[in-house]
Image: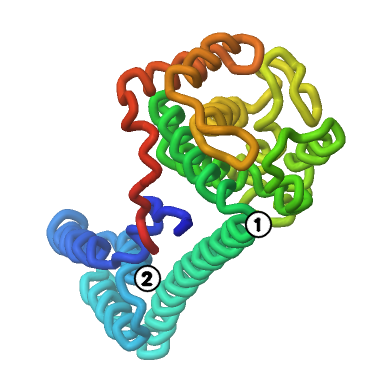
Amino acid sequence: MDQTIRVNKLEFLLQNPIPYRYVLAVCLGLNLFMDAYVYPEVSLTGFYLLTVVLIGFSFENKPLQVIATGLVTLLRFHFSPLGMPETAVFLLAWITYFLVSCSLSVLIKRYLRERKNVVHLTRALANALDSRDSYTANHSENVARYAEMIAQEMKFSKKECDNIYLGGIFHDFGKIGVSESILTKRSKLTETEFSQIKKHPTIGYKILKHVPVFKHNGVLDMVLYHHERFDGKGYPEGLKGEQIPIAARIIAVADSFDAMTSNCVYRSEKNLEYALNEIRKNIGTQFDPAVAQIFLKIVEAKGETILTRTRNVEKN
């Protein structure tokens, strides 16, 4: 499985300084016009500081930052009603502007580096799960895809949809702590073996709770609560109805649907109509009615094509 965290709008802008350079040019031109013709008797220091901020977004190269901030400093004092200051004051202003732009560049680099670290961590964790059970790898990708479809139909934001997709990838991560002999057993599980399987949400939560990003994007809730039931008869905590986080309720529907339409080691592949009927029968008991109805609507619209085990993902 080739899993990654998709690039959000902020990252796209931070990685592409060209738009900022256009904004910088427009902002600087407007600033000069206002300074020279609209407010010639006022020092527009704040507007020049804004252009310095844009320089930090526009240029990563330090010599270019030195030149650009020097030019802004020169223009600021050229149009100032007080005229050019002493050399020491000019240099101090120049250095201040350079440090502001430089600090912004450093912060941007740090943010992008942290995001890359999260991507690498995500891939490493996903690969660790894949190595245990090839079925789980395909299952997790399918669940992520179905869950994202539901979230999109429910008008979740793009960021929320991305987080739900990520939760689908990791919802069964706790199975890494379950015996391989149980995961790959071809006959029906015993009660004792099933009790071991039921521990995987808690195991996954305990492992992933140490990943800072998962604390804030809802992935931990999806990992821990995706086997809770709407009627309160699920596990591990027996949450009921809206006590269950909405993202976990979405994963629950997607998880069950894929389990019923996939060919795993202990259950032969069921057909699409069987899966849909099972979801219909369990609306309000196992599944959130609103989530289940939305997913049924999606499947009825897409038909058999929804079972395609492929998905386009953006590459980093």
| Residue at the (44%, 21%) spot, across then down | 295
| Residue at the (43%, 72%) spot, across then down | 105
Q: Is residue 167 left or right of residue 161?
A: right
Counting other residues with Cα less than 10 Å from the Cα at mark 1, is it few (<14), some (14-19), or many (20 or more)? some
Identity of the amino acid at label 2?
Gly
- x, y percent for residue 164: 52, 39
- Foreground tag (2 vs 1): 1
Q: Of residues 248 and 84, which is closer to you in this image?
A: 248
| Residue at the (13%, 59%) spot, across then down | 37
Q: How is the image coloured?
A: rainbow
- x, y percent for residue 144: 49, 40
Hey, which quadrant is residue 172 in on the image? top right
Hey, which quadrant is residue 227 in on the image? top right
Above or below, 93 against 26 in this view is below
User: Whole-Å distance between the Cαs marked 2 and 1?
Assistant: 46 Å
- Count numbered badges in the picture: 2
- x, y percent for residue 311: 36, 46
Hey, which quadrant is residue 251 in on the image? top right
Identity of the amino acid at label 1?
Arg
| Residue at the (47%, 55%) spot, across then down | 5
Judging by the rendered image, the residue that carries numbered circle 2 is: 56
Reading the chain from its start, which is encountered first: label 2 or label 1? 2
Taking the view exactly as shown, the residue that stands out farthest to the front is: 187
Quarter of the picture containing the C terminus is: bottom left
Q: Is residue 3 left or right of residue 73?
A: right
Circles 2 and 1: CB atoms closer than 8 Å: no
Does residue 46 appear in this view? Answer: no
Judging by the rendered image, the residue that carries numbered circle 1 is: 132
Q: Secondary structure at mark 1?
A: helix
Tag of residue 226: none
Q: Of residues 300 and 232, which is closer to you in this image?
A: 300
Q: Secondary structure at mark 2?
A: helix
